[in-house]
């Protein structure tokens, strides 16, 4: 696995554990609920991960974008599909989304290796 | 057609015409580009309208939400599907999205009539 | 009770019921979790309602502001205390928060009646 | 003067007075500082009002937009100039800014009367 | 003192000095006003620092979060109290706040050393 | 040329090329439109670059700020002028903009070398 991806995932796991170790019930339940949100339902996980990606892009959160890109990769999205999600995000959110798209584009390449 | 929906669409048409009548080239081209963004491509218009809806919800723009709800209705989304889009928006964007979800829920009902 | 307050609360109840009637599990659990967040804990409900108010102000959500103002009223916050919350919100969030502060100030007056 | 403009200004004055009557020193000083920000300096008031307008648009605050449009009118901005400010706001901030541009376009017309 | 904390504070001091050396009166007065905002008043500095923290979290500004975490440490907030502030921020602001909570959790640990 | 500036520009060029190599028509046209937005028109490029800068600051995008600072340098803005743009951004957007102003102030110094 690519080094950038590995580092991101290790950081994510380590800090999630730190947060959960403090036993704040509201945060614990929100983390749980977060996982449930993307489960198969009336909409497929594939569609929901695209929704999560576009929402993360217009809200401009690089770590959230990386996370959903990994999930989109697991759902076998093509590069053309991912770039159409990028297009919606950039049109709705404006050119302020471009720097995040740059980082997303790089991370997507790393995920193909 | 429901009165709220009619009013919204008339206001939208009238003010769009006002804007376009001023012949600002950048704005004209952005309006054009906006329509192209949701055309069939690697992703279906159906999927893209859901992306537009969730992006509008987390960015909390009521008029944008109404517009995409109408488009989702045209794409025959079920109420269960639309509420799963609402769910992603509320989890990613937080309870600050709830008041917009309230107005979206009402507009969705109006669109069923 | 003041008419504005009554209308706001009726609208809120009616649309919450509409949303919950659709049985989306994620949304239902988020609504539940939202209530738990402000329960007495390491911090008092009083403090947490101020936290909810300032967060709603910097995120500029009028309905959320109204809701937390009502809760702050129930917690017997003084006008001086509420205005110090307003001050933090305006300094952190900037003058873009002023129009929301105007509406908040009016609603706070209505809550005193 | 147009009714919409009059109402907006009366509401603004009345609620500003309400806020200032509570003697919160931080808020008072911020209100003062706000006026100073747009005074002639290295940049002209004319330029600064355009800066205030574009900032209000990308942050999507209708009341702030109205206020700065009035100031831009006082500074004799042409419609072509105002629409170029709108264009920057829409490109940087994305199509989410369009509904605010619609309301801005209407208000600008009212200001010409 | 922990290296991360030291570096952050040195960077902050150095760049604040750079900004203030340019003698922009509006910025200088805003910096001053910022300090006054958190002074003892109708609300305690302790409460206000929590307000500053939650506002910084929902607006997702890592440097602002670090600054207010240091102030919360000086005010002897317990870890349980800080995590209840985190909980309000995550519920109001949504899962988009989680990556900032991860970095906040790490910084809070560093502050305990 | 200063190392930080060189690195930023190389990263920008490389990732822009990556994005454009994927041939997403909407993104390509948005990139084009972005350049046109700042061309001489009813307003000068000089004024428009200031508009781009202030919009980037209140939306808190460091890379966008750097880009527009470079353009402002090319347009021979003085330090006093740039700091008045900073002032508008900080007043409208609040103290949450200060950390971005710190990084902007450093980058502006680098651009003077």
Image (cartoon, coloured by chain):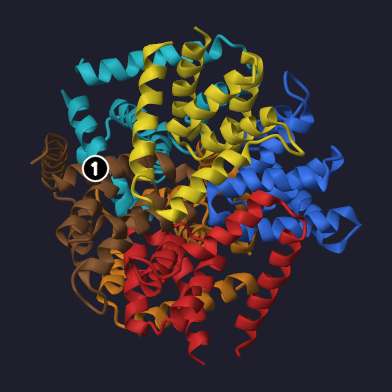
Chain colours: A brown, B red, C orange, D blue, E cyan, F yellow
- Quarter holding the N terminus of chain E is top left
**Relative depth, front residue between C89 and B106:** B106
Extreme-bottom residue of the structure: B113
- Quadrant position of residue A35: bottom left
The structure residue drawn at horizontal position 64% and vertical position 53%, both measured from the top left corner, is B27
Please say whether residue C102 is visible from this viewpoint.
no
Please say whether residue A54 is visible from this viewpoint.
yes
Q: Using residue F79 as the reference point, say whether residue C51 is left or right of it.
A: left
- Quadrant position of residue B53: bottom left
Numbered marks: total: 1
The structure residue drawn at horizontal position 37% and vertical position 70%, both measured from the top left corner, is B86
Q: Position of residue D34 (x, y in %)?
A: 68, 33
Extreme-top residue of the structure: F113
Q: Using residue E53 as the reference point, say whether residue D33 is left or right of it.
A: right
Extreme-left residue of the structure: A1
The structure residue drawn at horizontal position 59% and vertical position 76%, both measured from the top left corner, is C7
Residue under label 1, please give it. Answer: A107
| Mark 1: secondary structure | helix
Look at the picture and state if A75 lies above or below C19: above
Look at the picture and state if F77 lies above or below D86: above
- Quarter holding the C terminus of chain E is top left
- Quadrant position of residue A113: top left
**Relative depth, front residue between B12 and F95:** B12
**Relative depth, front residue between B27 and B61:** B27
Q: Position of residue F50 (x, y in %)?
A: 63, 30
Q: Disc 1 sits on a residue from what chain?
A: A
Q: Using residue D72 as the reference point, say whether residue A40 is left or right of it.
A: left
Q: Position of residue E89 (x, y in %)?
A: 34, 49
**Relative depth, front residue between F58 and B35:** B35
Bin the neighbour count of mark 1 within 10 Å (Cα to Cα): few under 14, some 14-19, many 20 and up.
Answer: some
Q: Position of residue B42 (x, y in %)?
A: 33, 65
């Amino acid at each position: 696995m690519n080094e950038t991806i590995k580092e991101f995932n290790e950081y994510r796991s380590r800090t999630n554990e730190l947060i959960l170790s403090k036993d704040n019930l509201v945060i614990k339940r929100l983390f749980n609920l977060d996982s449930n949100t993307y489960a198969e339902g009336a909409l497929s996980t594939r569609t929901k991960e695209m929704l999560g990606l576009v929402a993360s892009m217009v809200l401009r959160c690089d770590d959230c974008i990386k996370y959903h890109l990994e999930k989109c990769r697991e759902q076998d999205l093509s590069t053309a599909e991912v770039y159409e999600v990028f297009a919606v995000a950039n049109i709705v959110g404006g050119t302020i989304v471009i720097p995040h798209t740059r980082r997303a584009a790089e991370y997507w390449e790393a995920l193909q290796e």
